[in-house]
Amino acid sequence: MIRVGVNGYGTIGKRVADAVSAQPDMEVAGVAKTQPNFEAHTAVERGYPMYAAIPERAPLFSDAGIEIAGVVDELVADADVMVDATPSGIGAENRSLYASYDTPAIFQGGEDATVAETSFNARSNYEDAYGADTVRVVSCNTTGLSRVVAPLEEEYGVEKVRATLVRRGGDPSQNSRGPINDILPNPIEIPSHHGPDVKTIFPDLEIDTMGLKVPATLMHVHALNVTLESDVTAAHVRQLLDKQTRIYVIPEGMGLDGAGKLKDFALDAGRPRGDLWENCLWGESIATEGRDLYLFQAIHQESDVVPENVDAVRAVAEAADAETSIERTNETLGIGLSGDPSGFGDAQVEAEAADD
Ligand code: NAD
């Protein structure tokens, strides 16, 4: 059993802890929190040993009726792997703590790429993290882009990616973020920082990105234009993307016309917290013109990195190869929304091939 400690139990940390506890080869060694808020009470109910992330605040936990197992140093000493899910910048500060106990650490996308030996996306570069001491799971947007780029690159070669990222203003619980009523080019400078971040996974990729922020909390939406190295048909691309286990190609006829309905769909499907671990990519949007491919996808910012963290744990622990890990994570979490009832699959590709 790989004993995983989670430092920082907020949006990402609590989801990673639950995903770890669902794995047959992992257990939650404990979670470290700065304060005994509602999430701390939930963690205790779920049976996760609680550690004080800031030792001086330990008495606050007993005052709130929460028994702690110790302070964060003890968790780091006890764990086989630490997942740092603290706010951006704090992870880098925690790096020396993990190193001092020789405990491999996984950081999140809010940290600079320099925080770790390698940036990580399971589908794209699992092997780079194998046996590493430090790994950074890239951000939600970079994860979403990488999952699409990897199969396109393998199948057709990619000449250039151009992506416009319409980003949610904040997560549902982030009541201090915005905009409330505006549409912001963000960052105003072009290209945005997302392209360089994707290049931490695909160093040779040509990619330009532009970002906006809108008054929404549900998901991000990406508009992609990818120039491929060979002519393609929309049906062929669709079939390729449909085979990717962490991409849900939304079938026609589902009525899933936006992020709101996607979140409803996730809740109806009984997904914990309404999470959508997969890229949600509109099948009808896949269009081609020669070597140019266009598509829209929605990315659930709170959850797409969660299975990636689970796979990163196996990679640093050298516990499984990429295929085995991804399959196990997918199976245990229940990744893979229902298939394509529209019949837009093999038959269409074959028909188009016959027309060529
Ligand atoms: P969050 O604010 O929801 O959670 C962070 C938690 O860490 C909070 O509970 C906070 O109290 C706690 N914390 C603060 N200082 C700490 C410390 N010194 N030690 C331990 N815990 C501490 O943040 P989040 O959204 O979960 O983001 C965590 C990381 O994941 C960031 O790098 C972020 O960029 C990245 N990320 C976030 C999202 C997202 O959309 N929320 C998506 C992908 C990646």
Image (spheres, helix red, strand yellow):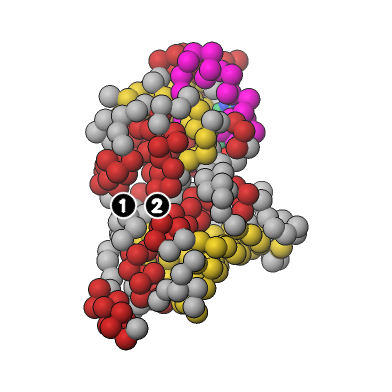
Residue 104, given in percent of the width and then of the height, sits at 46, 23
Q: Residue at x 33, y 41 (%)?
A: 322
Q: Residue at x 46, y 69 (%)?
A: 230
Q: Nearer the viewer, residue 290 or 193?
A: 290
Kindly indicate the quadrant of the structure image that contains residue 332: top left
Tag 2 residue: 277
Q: Amino acid at mark 2?
A: Trp
Left/right placement of residue 45 relative to residue 36 reads left
Q: Quadrant of ligand 1?
A: top right
**Badge 1: few (under 14), some or many (20 or more) residues near its Cα, within 10 Å?**
some
**Badge 2: few (under 14), some or many (20 or more) residues near its Cα, within 10 Å?**
many
Q: Amino acid at mark 1?
A: Ile
Decide: is 23 above or below 344.
Answer: above
Residue 277, given in percent of the width and then of the height, sits at 40, 52
Secondary structure, mark 1, is loop
Secondary structure, mark 2, is loop
Q: Is residue 307 magenta?
A: no
Left/right placement of residue 333 relative to residue 281 reads left
Decide: is 18 above or below 224.
Answer: above
Q: Is residue 85 magenta?
A: yes
Q: Residue at x 64, y 59 (%)?
A: 208
* Callout 2: CB less than 8 Å from ligand 1: no
Q: Which residues are magenta?
A: 82-104
Tell which circle, 1 or 2, labels the residue nearer the N-terminal end. Answer: 2
Tag 1 residue: 335
